Amino acid sequence: EIVLTQSPGTLSLSPGERATLSCRASQSVSSTYLAWYQQKPGQAPRLLIYDVSNRATDIPDRFSGSGSGTDFTLTISRLEPEDFAIYYCQQYGTSPLTFGGGTKVEIK
Amino acid sequence: QVTLRESGPALVKPTQTLTLTCTFSGFSLDTRAVCVSWIRQPPGKPLEWLARVDWDDDKYYSSSLRTRLSIVKDTSKNQVVLKMTNMGPADTATYYCARQSSGTSCRVGMDVWGQGTSVTVSS
């Protein structure tokens, strides 16, 4: 099973700042099969990025993904008030599918 | 419009079997490269993938919960049913179903999620 470790656990930033979230896999992720999700309190997760770097429908271009192998990054170029949430990475190339433990982006 | 909706009991007793239903619309599980997964989230904890059923009836399960889970699809009703046996307090969570589909495979992100259904395990 591929274990995904996200860091930091919490990121305290101000609106307008850049956020860099990390996701590290215990073994190489098959091809580009990694996604990022955003979750706000009381809501279901929302797909932001799939296949490492492709934005899902209606996701603004301030969100970008990169990486390969075992190291992946989600970058939010300029934080908007609605971006403060928890972010999860997920690999879907190898069964069982797995999620990371999440990074909370909070207002500083 | 693609939608999924979870339904099931809000409260189950320890040792009971939980049965959850995901009813979807806007797509068919008869179509190639369409899959539906179940995911859960205990209060204040991360997401945990549980199981997936594919258009061709292939099934995949969480390693740690494999012996307790079963997933089936009913394409005539547009439903996916998850059963989890021997429920315990640690299974208290919000349970979600979600679709994976890219037209060519299910190796893609979960693009549409249900709103989730909360399940509490308590006597």
Image: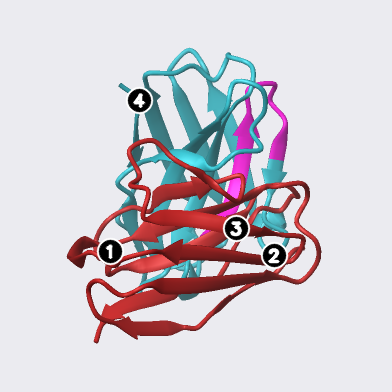
The answer to the question of whether label 4 and label 2 lie on touching residues, with beta carbons closer than 8 A, is: no
N-terminal-most mark, 1 or 3: 3
Q: Give the prevailing secondary structure in the magenta stretch.
A: strand
Gap in Å between the C-alphas at discs 3 and 4? 28 Å
Q: Is residue B2 left or right of residue B62?
A: left
Which chain letter matches label 3? Answer: A
Gap in angstroms between the C-alphas marked 4 and 2: 31 Å
Q: Position of residue A102 (x, y in %)?
A: 48, 72
Number of residues whose C-alpha sits closer than 10 Å to that of mark 4, classed few (under 14), some (14–19) or many (20 or more): few
Question: Of the residues tagged 4 and 1, which is closer to the observer?
Answer: 1
CA gap, disc 4 and disc 1 = 25 Å
- Residue range highlighted in magenta: B48-59
Query: Please, what is the three-letter code of the amino acid marked with disc 2?
Result: Ser
Q: In the image, A29: left or right of A90?
A: right
> For residue A66, which numbered disc appears in the image?
3
Q: Which residue is mark 1?
A: A83
